[in-house]
Image: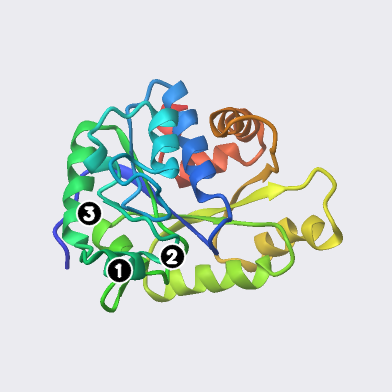
Amino acid sequence: MPAELPGRGIFITGTDTGVGKTIIAATLATLLRAQGVSVGVMKPVETGINDLTSMGPDARLLRASSGCSAADQLIAPYRFAPPVAPALAASKAGIKIDLQHICDCYRQLAASHDYVIVEGAGGLMVPLVGGLLTCDLVTLLQLPLLIVTRPTLGTINHTLLTIFAARTMELPVSGFVINRMPATPELAEQEAPHTLASLASASLLGVLPQVDDGSPTEITTTLAATWREAATFGWATAALNITPYF
């Protein structure tokens, strides 16, 4: 059993790559920061970075949204150029990702912030090092999961599989968010929220719209305002352990 880690926080994962985990993580950070909460953010492994001397776009958006002033090395301890899975990117760079080092970085962030948002790479089964996957990192960090999914065809299978995998590995699931709902949804997209809410063994904490206009920071501001006004926001604050802040 890993030693107990301090702090209140959430680990944000997705049902696939490209579902908008960073946008949702930044949106949550924006909401908390607006309430005067000291928010720590972390992107343990980011790939597809052009300039490895600075943080990648995901980590930069998390910092901008949260106002977190921690060192780059704490927010983004591992950065790689190839836009591939972390284990492969690290192997090509001749670097071994150390999960305990990530835990140490998290521990420092948790010690100096009220709430810490950690965003994973891809989904729970993404390989990090050797036979260890993102789910193993979640176990070490002892954080509950917020799962980000999409409304399009195929999401029911992907979302239920992700939640099932988390439950099987005894990872606590706070709930899931459906991201990028079109203004004019197709039939599958219209029915996805109801179907998932009825079949998933986890709470639907929000259905956020597709927002294409504006910078990433402007998009997160728009989504934060939308989520705050949603009927499910009260459930979300309770599930994410942030009710005292609102």
**Dots 1 and 2: beta carbons under 8 Å?**
yes
- Circle 2: residue type: Val
| Mark identifier at residue 102 | 3
Foreground mark, 1 or 3, reads: 1
Closer to the eye: label 1 or 2: 1
Q: Amino acid at mark 1?
A: Lys
The structure residue drawn at horizontal position 17% and vertical position 59%, both measured from the top left corner, is: 100
Q: Upstream in the sequence, badge 3 or badge 2?
A: 2
Which residue matches tag 2? 84
Q: Nearer the viewer, mark 3 or mark 2?
A: 2
Q: Nearer the viewer, residue 101 or 79?
A: 79
Q: How many marks?
A: 3
- Dividing the picture into quadrants, the one containing residue 94 is bottom left
Quadrant where the N terminus sits is bottom left
Position of residue 128 in the picture relative to residue 159 (left or right): left
Q: Mark 1 — residue? A: 92
Percent coordinates x, y for residue 162 in the rendering: 52, 69
Q: Helix, strand, or loop for circle 3?
A: helix
Q: Are marks 3 and 2 in contact (CB under 8 Å)?
A: no
Residue 228 picture location, percent across and down = 60, 31
